[in-house]
Amino acid sequence: MPVRIALDAMGGDLAPAAPVGAARTALLRRTGALEVILVGPAPVVEEALDAAGGPVPGLTVFPSGPGVPEGGHPATWMRAHPDSSVQTAARLAATGEAEAAVSMGHTGACLVAAVWEMGLLPGVVRPAAAVTFAFAPDMVFLDAGPNPDPGPEEIVQFARLGAAYARVQFGVREPTVALLSNGAESGKGNRLARAAHDLLRQSGLRFVGNCEGNDLVRRPADVVVTDGFTGNCVLKAIEGLGEHVVGQLRALLPPSLPGREEVLSGVAALGDATQTGAPVAFLGVDGVFVPGHGRSGADAIAATLLRTEGAVRAGLAPALRRALEPEGTKGATLA
Amino acid sequence: MPVRIALDAMGGDLAPAAPVGAARTALLRRTGALEVILVGPAPVVEEALDAAGGPVPGLTVFPSGPGVPEGGHPATWMRAHPDSSVQTAARLAATGEAEAAVSMGHTGACLVAAVWEMGLLPGVVRPAAAVTFAFAPDMVFLDAGPNPDPGPEEIVQFARLGAAYARVQFGVREPTVALLSNGAESGKGNRLARAAHDLLRQSGLRFVGNCEGNDLVRRPADVVVTDGFTGNCVLKAIEGLGEHVVGQLRALLPPSLPGREEVLSGVAALGDATQTGAPVAFLGVDGVFVPGHGRSGADAIAATLLRTEGAVRAGLAPALRRALEPEGTKGATLA
């Protein structure tokens, strides 16, 4: 059975060209295994499709309203425009017309669309944004923002959901979990981290203890959890330093250096927000919604579509649902 | 009048050779303007001094007990050994035999020594660790660790102390202050950051609003404040990425590249803990205690001595004292 993905054709800085081009690329590579539903105002999407080379097998267009505009409070705008492309894509995934929704649009708008259309898993107050880093692409780091003030129980919830994600997306049987803190010793942390540490030890998860900020590049575990405030500050600091280093290198490396651009782009990837720190999933919604960075080009979006196809095929949605059922979790951890 | 600095001769990975060598270097550059009191067990310090080339004008040795050993809980050990080199150095600065104490020893031990011997400024619960980054050497970032759970009033206190430090150490007349948060808008933040934001707006300080993690490399203000948990995670993440990038570059840059080592060391400095993220001052103690990174070599320690001489000469201790007096602060801000 092909996996059907609803792709927000209007999401991201390079829409509709990049999502439309990405859909064609992904479909040409996975003919028969993948179907992509391009969601957006039909004339706009069809024009972009013509410009990109026309329809390919497995591609359909689902008409919707426009993309959510930049700036302002997305939820306010979306309440008045429930037919926006991102919300329509989420709706298709929620009603079963697709198995997943993908959007490179504004992260806040994506989060609202995912929550409104897919709903939350039992016990979840607000989904967590899971991100990966270019220096550790198979390590899940969460929460990257939506939960600046979680309780310790929610940090454990992030850990359960992150572990389920790592199992399905990266094929790790018993993912390890670390807690970001200001010291490796178990007594270190702010009140929240210390309480979360204690709960994680009793969680049945494979908790390996605290890690510090400088441990992240050493990939301390399959899953690293923290609150959304610290997580956001840390990943943006990494993004900023990465971009800064590339600027420095550009000045330092002689223009004649063979492979100069490769060196620069290799280093750039470490801090580039399209490859590092952009959310790869909202964990806590009942379904698969894959957000991405607004700057993503067609190649990055095509890679996201293929990654999402893999996750759906491996059973991400049921795995996330099971992760928050105490017995299901235990079974999955021991599996 | 020469500035007298008590230097912990036993602090740091390279002690006593590095502190002793640094004292000689600094004194040879600042003869008549600087005096350095080397604090440590006399035979050990004198042997290191002989090995380094012997006494120079302005150098004296003050005998003490040993350095605080690595590992364990420094305060416990120090309670039983009140004559440790770091605590003795702090005591000399507290009793007026020196104007400042400098140590590259364990940060926790330095903090304990500074608090026990110098005491706290009025209203301070625990000093904040102020750090600088190699990419913005004249920006003060605090707290880097000692206060994982401050209240919003303490964040304002950090801002006042940081501003006083920037005025004296960097000669900025009206230092700007930014608050690290997970979004630039004033409503963004966790509960603590939102409350601190409101208090900072009413503080009389030159508050420029929130900055995000990726803004740090753009030096958003003279002073950036955050809680010690977030601050510690962020600066260690920067340190880790910096070291990781250098490792990557070492592999990517051809060995034959002219200036290869300069490129590597330029980039290394951005994340190197001896130049980035090591505390430059404990703000909140009643006096001048300058800690540094344990890996510091003689050059880094000599630079610290000269920087400390400048800070003392510019009146750091009274400026910090004034910073927490409401009227004094206002006067200083408008000065």
Image: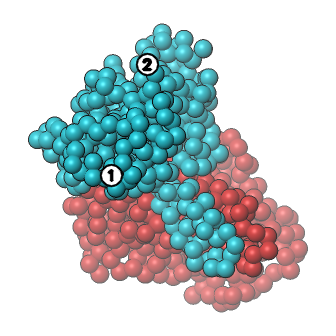
Chain colours: A cyan, B red
Q: What residue type is labelled 2?
A: Pro
Closest to the observer: B187 or A186? B187
**Chain ID, mark 2:** A
Q: Which mark is residue A318?
A: 2
Residue B54 is situated, as x and y percent measured from the top left of the image, at 85, 80
Residue B59 is situated, as x and y percent measured from the top left of the image, at 73, 79
**Chain ID, mark 1:** A
Quadrant of res B333: bottom left
**Residue in the image at 64% along x and 65% along y:** A263
* Left or right relative to A49: residue A313: right
Q: Distance between the residues labelled 2 and 1?
A: 37 Å
**Would you call the spot at circle 2 few (<14 residues within 10 Å), some (14-19), or many (20 or more)?**
some
Quarter of the image containing the N terminus of chain B?
bottom right
Residue A187 is situated, as x and y percent measured from the top left of the image, at 56, 34
* Secondary structure type for disc 2: helix
**Residue in the image at 54% along x and 34% along y:** A223
Residue A243 is situated, as x and y percent measured from the top left of the image, at 50, 64
Q: Which mark is residue A325?
A: none
Closest to the observer: A110 or A181? A110
Q: What residue type is labelled 1?
A: Asp
**Would you call the spot at circle 1 few (<14 residues within 10 Å), some (14-19), or many (20 or more)?**
few
Residue closest to the far top: A327
Quarter of the image containing the C terminus of chain B?
bottom left
**Residue in the image at 45% along x and 13% along y:** A326
Residue closest to the far bottom: B32
Closest to the observer: B83 or B49? B49
* Secondary structure type for disc 1: helix
Is A137 located above or below residue B201 in the figure?
A: above
* Residue hosting label 1: A50
* Left or right relative to B17: residue A56: left
Quadrant of res A150: top left
